Image (cartoon, helix red, strand yellow):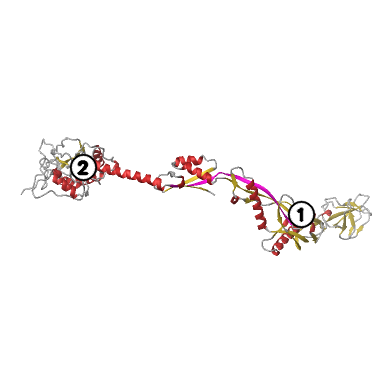
Amino acid sequence: MSAPNRPPRGATLVVSLYESLPDVLARVRNEAGHAVRLEIPTGSPLFLTAVEFRALREVARDRRIELSLVTDDSLRRQLASVFNLPVEGPGARPAEHRPHMGGPPAVNATTRTIAGAPPRTAPGAPPPVPPGERPVRVRNPLPPLPGDEPASREDGVRPAQPGRWPGRPRGDTDPAITTSPPTDGTPRRLAETGRVGDQAEPTDVVARSRESGRLAISPRTVALAIGALALTGVVLLAVGYFLLSSATVMITPVTRPASADLEYAIVPPDTDPPANVLVVPGERVSLDFSVEASQATTGTRAEPAGEARGRVRFSNPNDEDIDIAAGTSLETEAGQAYAVDEDLTIPAGDPGLGRYGSAEASVTAEDPGTGGNIEIGGLSGRLENGVYFSNRDAPLADGTDREVPVVAAGDVQALRETATVALREKITAEVDQSTPDGVTIVPESIAEDDLTFSFSGQAGDEAETLSVTASAPVTVLTYRPAETETAILADATTRLTAGAPAGFQFDPASLQLAAPVLVEADGSGARYTVTGSGRWVALISDADRDRLADQLAGSDAGEADRILSSVPSIEGSEVDYGPGWLPDRMPPSAGRISIAVDD
């Protein structure tokens, strides 16, 4: 039995309206090595996605088929251009293959076939379409079934255009799956071949629909089902809104800063308290304290240390030798005395010739110190025996003074202040240690007149260190800080509450006290001022909340924000709508609106 003839080069395959993708790919695959024109009807559910075109291109490449498409659908033309598949318009004729003349035959790089070679025919291929005949198309196709997927925008392709079903038949569209043509000699159906003379039986259409598990559902039925679902959703939302909706409004009221200055006094029980101030009871405690302190002196005084020395020249105008004994005193015009260090004899001079006998000797200042240092010629004069003397060659030097530390007047005062501070610190520490827990003293209640000081030296005394012992029998005032703070907070709260503006109330939790400032302190007690600060909060009563809930009932989120922002006593607000699956809208009933004030 001979195999069916293959279609000639340039054969046209028409995609049936009820044909599956594997069927079409199998038919194209049977045209291996040939040029094929694949005509896709506009109403076909196939070749509307990039996946189908990719499978078609792979089959053409694998079987070396010179494939071109015939379609007037812009979507399919775009998909074909994405996958480099040539497209022809409807009714175009395939290009004629002419044999290559001269030389070796030309090879088509795309189909890898030799130009001019006779077409190859695969066994079982359907007969070609006779010249002049148009392929038969089946009209009134079955409507698309639920589950058909519309063409996506994969690889930049737009979706299917309106007016045709954008999906494709359900089933395996893997291009690797092939469907062999029938080999029992029976004619293939139009759904498989799409050629003239093939038959398309209605029973086959129904069978295909059943085999693929699909039911023929009309678009009107789908639209009615969708409308019913939408109506059900609307009804559920309405019921949920009227029965389940709720809202919680958290209000932040308007605030104003509040402050007040208070004055309080700590006084012992036997002292009359001052008027118009908060009185805090205190207690006197008598104790004896003493401290010792010392510091380095800062004063200095210069005292002579080394004697000035030098050489003196003697001149004798007499005609006889003159002896000068050691210890002979030589004085300057200012009375600074120098003693000759050794005995010497001054030779006689010649008065007639005007010659003087001369000799030199060393001298030392009789008083040490830098006062003995004099310049050249500073020690000059004449002794009673007529001999002249002068340090005419060099100055007298080496006289020195030493610096002695002494007590300066400021040292005494500074040490007195240091001892006073140390004594008060000791009093404070020892009183706190000797008092029960929760009791402290008023440091300013110690009077300086009660202190006595014993210094180791006075101003001008030579000393490197000055020390002092400070002592005092003192009486200090004690009080209980916890009770004092409680009394101050209560008084400040009362004052700030009374001073609240109209429509406001004081928030006690916001009250803070600054550090106390001493006004005065003596043996009768101590007075302080302190500033209390906080905030006044706008008053929102229960009646205000009920009225606000009535205004908010039934409003949407935007209107609710406008209502809340229009209330002068509200600085800010936050609304929590429930349940979450309902739109943000106030419940229709004010009873389901909860209004709370942020503290």
Residue 158: x %, y % from top left: 28, 40
The secondary element bearing badge 1 is classed as loop
For mark 1, what is the residue? 272
- In primary-sequence order, the first of circles 2 and 1 is 2
Predominant secondary structure, magenta span: strand
Q: Tag 1: residue type?
A: Asp
Residue 77 vs residue 46, the one in the foreground: 46
Q: In the figure, is residue 509 to the left or right of 295?
A: left
Q: From which residue to which does the magenta span run?
A: 246-267
The image quarter in which residue 33 lies: top left
Residue 197: x %, y % from top left: 10, 41
Q: Residue at x 16, y 48 (%)?
A: 207
Instruction: Determine if the magenta segment contains residue 254.
Output: yes
Residue 246 vs residue 370, the one in the foreground: 246
Residue 398 in sight here: no
Residue 335: x %, y % from top left: 89, 53
For mark 2, what is the residue? 143
